[in-house]
Image (cartoon, rainbow, N blue to C red):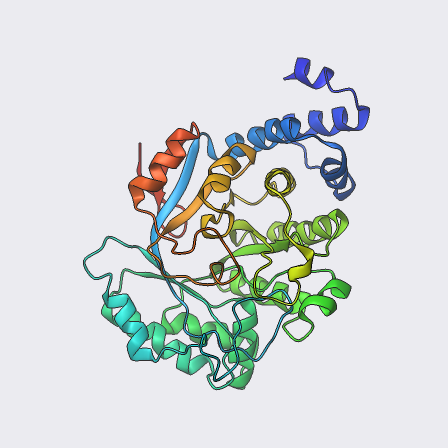
């Protein structure tokens, strides 16, 4: 490795590469330099070092499905293609009975997780959503319930008249197992005002996840990239996540989420290319040295980019999903009806040169090649 580092002509990149090879933490300034100056082959090499240090040659996936209760939402974020107003022919709202029917469709399938996230419905508080979780657990006790972004949680808990801590304790008692990472978008407060001013603040998102971790509820984290943010904004976002993870250790995975241009008021921006996707995966893997996993969410990126990302720091391919999410298909994802079998995912992983490992929601290995 030292010989390769000596071939790097830029002295700043030489120093950063040496730190990464020695398992030393890089600074925000060094992370910014990687974004700006490092070419893709170098980023692949360095992110691969970190990836293998943490996860060897394994690439993880799980057997999961989604419930998206509604796309009616009190917020109307500029980047969102999912939100539809009441009366729109593309809007929907499932009853609890209909959502339980979705769960029952998987009764004879070997799934381990249900992922529940949707719009912030104006009418329902945490007890409504908690009773849904309770019914799911009564029907299938072993199913891991990963549910509700911090934005949804803030609204439903406040509507119930609880503090964040009280609300999370109640939801845990109802059966909530973990929290997805949605709603983080981009933490910079000025940018947030421009793209999603109505929703929960950056600090509220961080506070909710911190409190969840303190209560033994693990979570994921996300970042929306490829819109009006700069590399500086991305590093600021990653640094806030890294600092909270230092404090709590409660994040399981980081998931970069790409802005997609279809059917929203920011469509004029277009989309960043695959090179930028891979650059973002790589720098995220290098910078978030305390995050055990980086997830390539294939319904967003597409299967090919997700497969490529395994060579740029990602070590998780999410799950089988079985055509149960519409969030990214409504935004123009090429994966219009997202579904893969476990063998489909395993084949993609093997083709990329890694070892498939089926996991549960907390990254305990169920089966590996």
Q: Is residue 344 left or right of residue 269?
A: left
> Residue 242 placed where, x, y %?
64, 49
- The residue drawn where x is 47% and y is 35% is 55
| Front residue (pair 105, 239) | 105
> Residue 257 placed where, x, y %?
57, 53
Q: Is residue 315 visible?
A: no
- The residue drawn where x is 46% and y is 79% is 126
> Residue 209 placed where, x, y %?
56, 63
Q: Quadrant of the N terminus?
A: top right
Q: Residue furthest right?
A: 11
| Number of numbered labels in the structure image | 0
> Residue 68 placed where, x, y %?
41, 69
Q: Quadrant of the C terminus?
A: top left
- The residue drawn where x is 45% and y is 52% is 299
From this view, report whether residue 170 is shown above or below residue 50. Answer: below
Q: Residue furthest left?
A: 108
Q: Is residue 128 visible?
A: yes
Q: Quadrant of residue 2?
A: top right
Q: Is residue 280 left or right of residue 52?
A: right
- The residue drawn where x is 38% and y is 50% is 319
């Amino acid at each position: 490795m030292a010989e390769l580092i000596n071939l790097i002509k830029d002295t700043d990149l030489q120093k950063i590469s040496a730190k990464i090879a020695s398992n030393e933490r890089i600074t925000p300034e060094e992370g910014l330099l990687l974004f700006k100056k490092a070419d893709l082959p170098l980023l692949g090499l360095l992110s691969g070092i970190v990836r293998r240090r943490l996860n060897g040659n394994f690439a993880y996936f799980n057997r999961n499905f989604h419930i998206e209760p509604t796309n009616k939402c009190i917020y109307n974020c500029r980047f969102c293609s999912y939100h539809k107003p009441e009366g729109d022919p593309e809007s929907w709202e499932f009853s609890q009975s209909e959502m339980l029917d979705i769960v029952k469709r998987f009764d004879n399938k070997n799934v381990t997780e249900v992922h529940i996230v949707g719009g912030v419905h104006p009418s329902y508080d945490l007890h409504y959503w908690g009773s849904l979780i309770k019914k799911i657990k009564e029907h299938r006790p072993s199913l891991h319930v990963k549910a509700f972004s911090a934005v949804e949680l803030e609204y439903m808990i406040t509507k119930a008249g609880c503090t964040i801590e009280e609300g999370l304790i109640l939801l845990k008692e109802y059966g909530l197992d973990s929290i997805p990472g949605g709603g983080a978008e981009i933490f910079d407060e000025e940018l947030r005002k421009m793209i999603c001013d109505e929703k929960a603040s950056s600090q509220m998102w961080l506070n909710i996840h911190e409190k969840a971790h303190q209560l033994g509820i693990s979570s994921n984290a996300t970042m929306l990239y490829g819109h009006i943010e700069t590399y500086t904004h991305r590093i600021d976002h990653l640094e806030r996540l890294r600092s909270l993870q230092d404090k709590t250790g409660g994040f399981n995975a980081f998931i970069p989420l790409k802005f997609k241009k279809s059917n929203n008021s920011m469509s004029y921006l277009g989309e960043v290319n695959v090179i930028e996707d891979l650059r973002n995966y790589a720098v995220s893997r290098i910078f978030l040295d305390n995050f055990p996993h980086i997830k390539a969410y294939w319904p967003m990126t597409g299967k090919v980019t997700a497969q490529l990302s395994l060579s740029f720091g990602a070590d998780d391919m999410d799950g089988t999903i079985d055509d149960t999410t519409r969030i990214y298909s409504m935004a123009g994802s090429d994966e219009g009806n997202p579904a893969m079998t476990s063998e489909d995912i395993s084949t993609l992983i093997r083709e990329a040169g890694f070892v498939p490992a089926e996991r549960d929601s907390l990254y305990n290995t169920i089966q590996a090649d």
